[in-house]
Amino acid sequence: MALVVLLVLLLPYHTAHKARSQKCSVHEDLLPILHGFFQPGDFVIGQIAAHIHFFHETPTFQDQPKQMLKVEKIASFAVDATKIHPYIQNNEIADCTSDEHICYYLAKMTYKATLNLLSTQHDFFPNFKCDSLKNLLAVIGGLVSATSVNMAHILSIYKIPQLTYGSFSTVQDNKMQFPSLYQMVPNEAYQYLGVVRLFQHFRWTWIGLMAMDDDYGDRFLQAVVPLLSQNKICYSFILRTPKAMFMEELLEPLISLQEKVDSLMESKANVYFVLGEPPTLNLMRTILSTSLLGKVWIVTSQWDFDSLNPETMSIINVLHGAISFAVHSSQPPGFQTFLQTVKPFWQRQDGFIQDFWEQVFVCSLNDSKKSDSGRICTGEEKLESLPGTWFEMSMTGHSYNVYNAAYAVAHALQFMYTFRFKHRKLVEGGREAIHPVEPWQLHHFLRGICFTNSAGDTVHFNEDGELVEGFDVTNWVTFSNGSFIRVKVGRLDPQAPQGQELIVNDDQIVWHRNFNQTLPRSVCNEGCHPGYSKQKKEREPFCCYDCVPCPEGMISEQRDMDACVECPHDHYSNKHQSHCIPKSIIYLSYKEPLGITLAILAIALFLITTLVFGIFIKHKNTPIVKANNRSLTYVILTSLLLCFLCSLFFIGQPDKITCLLRQTIFGIVFSVALSSVLAKTITVVLAFMSTHPGSRMRKWMGKKMANSIVLSFSCIQAAICTLWLSTYPPFPDMDMESLHGVIIVECNEGSAVMFYCVLGYMGLLAIISFTVAFLARKLPDSFNEAKHITFSMLVFCSVWLSFVPTYVSIKGKSMVAVEIFSILASSAGLLCCIFSPKCYIILLRPEVNSKEQLIRKK
């Protein structure tokens, strides 16, 4: 491309060099500019506007290029707004007039149009002064990125300011390459951010992407695809539309594109984000008119209905409900009045207006050239009667950019004269002489330009030469007669805080008729309900996922959560795994039936033991009470009383004191009882052995031996409990994990080893007592307690052997209830097995309670 430009610039120079001393000869222009408009003045602002579709067949090199042109006129209108000096209120300067060339959507033709601006008025000799030049000050254009680039390649050589009003993403990558270019639109990256914010606002995560199959489309995808991924948005497909080429070569790409579009009909994506320039829409219009109906189209500011002509209006229903990001625009005062004055004979030399008039009103301005309808244009036709897709009476974003561009150049020129040219010379007629101005001199003033236009908007550029402005979010509402309106439904402010850039009024948006005015959904699959989390599908984008229920103890409170979260320790998940519920606190309480039952049972046994104790005290002098050491009997009864009472320590909310006392007191008291039983059993054995003549066992008989047994075995248990309390004492604790949905308030034993040592020592005493009693059960004594002690120890061992596995296997208040029951059962076993036979004799068989019966042998 650079080589072509170089040849275009050098060949005319070579021709002119031969005729240095001659006038420039007139020659036939093989590729003429079909439409142009020039109004002479002191300074000229050039404009290149792409308003005509230009195709040509594959070159055969047998015909001249102009004979191969295929031109399709379009229903668009360029308004002459460059006669601007009356609008500058103070220090009016010379006329700034226009030189407008109507160019083609084939961007290569822009080179010719740009070079034509640099040539003389009637001849095409760029870079050579054959005659008076047009005194070109700046150039406005173009709408399409490729057009803007081609213009910039040439204008940057001459340092002529170029104010582009359309897309120009190339300059964002290399600012140094085009220092003479100013963008009348904000940075395109802001639009992409706004579209992402729009997707997030409506929760659209599964969208389709469309872009031209060219460098501009590549840059679009390179910028948008990572941005979508960073914001958890996926694309269902990427459709590349063919770029403009020879007409014969378009057929195959369009057929291939139609096949791709047909396959996309099965996609779940209801939202399509399209990088749109007018050629994109022109190439896709025949396909869109039959496919992809009922979708939400998100388009950039370059899209416009101006690219449609009356014969291609079938696309209008497809774009109903589309959302567009348009450069902010306002309506300058007097604009409507100005449009009403436009007539086909308004500017005779402006052939495009006449072609436009004949096309949209289907009439002819030339009597000798009849239109298809046979009508002759009267010139009084009204522009406001045209559908909006042919002509809009309000100023659109692109027109507003051109309007501001012309004003920016005029203000820059005014500032230059104000600050640099204070001395003016008067020429003939008293008119001030205009100092010559070179285009490059405007750059300093354009970079710092800041003014308020007639619509009340502030216009200024940033350090990169981009307009500092936001975007309007517009909703396209179309009608069956071909008309449409743009409804502003929001605003994109790039300077707003992060996350607050986009403001959208949902209630004002009109969706496509297929959605019945409900918010369209565009997701790969329906979202996961609360209680479920997303699980990625194999070989699918992250937006496509399965929904799996949350595990036990975990929840998801919102839709489409990536992972379930654990409930706090003092909460648990509800049945649907969607909320955390506070756990209830449980312990064996006096207020619940189980606690009340056990407390009543403990008190009842305490009272029964007290009654037995009273009976024994009352009949303390009877032989049966005095037999086998009356003092040990009192110790056993006292221990049993304390055992029944200490079970009450296990009922109620545990605190530090109860946790320290309940196990240790129970262990020591029960050990005293078992030691007393053991001492009583040993006393029985010694008493029998001492009856033999000459037995040495008599010296062991007496209270000292029994007291020594009780104290020694009890002290061992007391030592174990003291060691336990001094090392790892029990403490109140909350068990949040053992039972679902509850917090168990319990006494943590501190050291499980010490706890089982206490139980184990009591078991050892019980086994020893059981063994001794079992061996002495058949001694010939009417009041032999050995066999009763044997049964009591059998009950005791049975209770506590069943207690250990049960205690380990259950949790919560049931575990405490089991321990209380074991204490009561084992104590009641001792009470019943040892003392019930004696009470029976004392109360019901007093005749047996005599000394004769005591010493009687079987």
Image (spheres, helix red, strand yellow):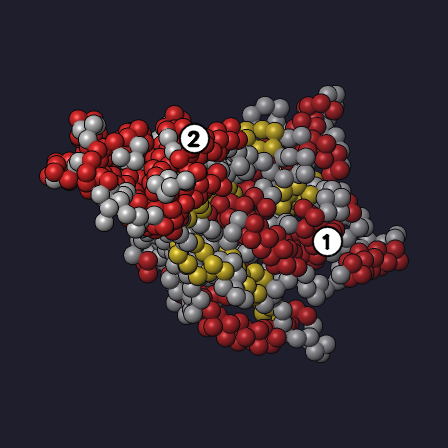
Q: Residues within 10 Å of mark 2 (few under 14, many from 20)?
A: few
Element marked by disc 1? helix
Which kind of residue does numbered mark 1 sit on?
Answer: Leu
Residue wearing tag 2: 708
- Quadrant of residue 25 within the rendered picture: bottom right
Image disc number at residue 115 = 1
Element marked by disc 2? helix
**Residue 483 vertical placement versus 764 (above, below):** below
**Residue 238 vertical placement versus 128 (above, below):** below
Tally of marks: 2
Q: Earlier in the sequence, mark 2 or mark 1?
A: 1
Residue 378: % across, % down: 40, 55
Q: Looking at this rendering, what residue extends furthest in the front direction?
A: 693
Q: Please name the residue shown 52% across and 66% down the image.
A: 538
Q: Residues within 10 Å of mark 1 (few under 14, many from 20)?
A: some
Q: Looking at this rendering, what residue extends furthest in the top direction?
A: 423
Residue 309: % across, % down: 46, 61
Residue 751: % across, % down: 49, 38
Side (left or right) of 727 relative to 118:
left
- Quadrant of residue 321 within the rendered picture: bottom left
Q: Tell me if residue 567 can be seen.
A: no
In terms of depth relative to the viewer, which is nearer, 65 or 234?
234
Q: Please name the residue shown 68% across and 38% down the image.
A: 464
- Quadrant of residue 266 within the rendered picture: bottom left
Side (left or right) of 600 relative to 64:
left
Which kind of residue does numbered mark 2 sit on?
Answer: Ser
Q: Quadrant of the N terminus?
A: bottom right
Q: Please name the residue shown 54% across and 52% down the image.
A: 228
In terms of depth relative to the viewer, which is nearer, 747 or 606?
606
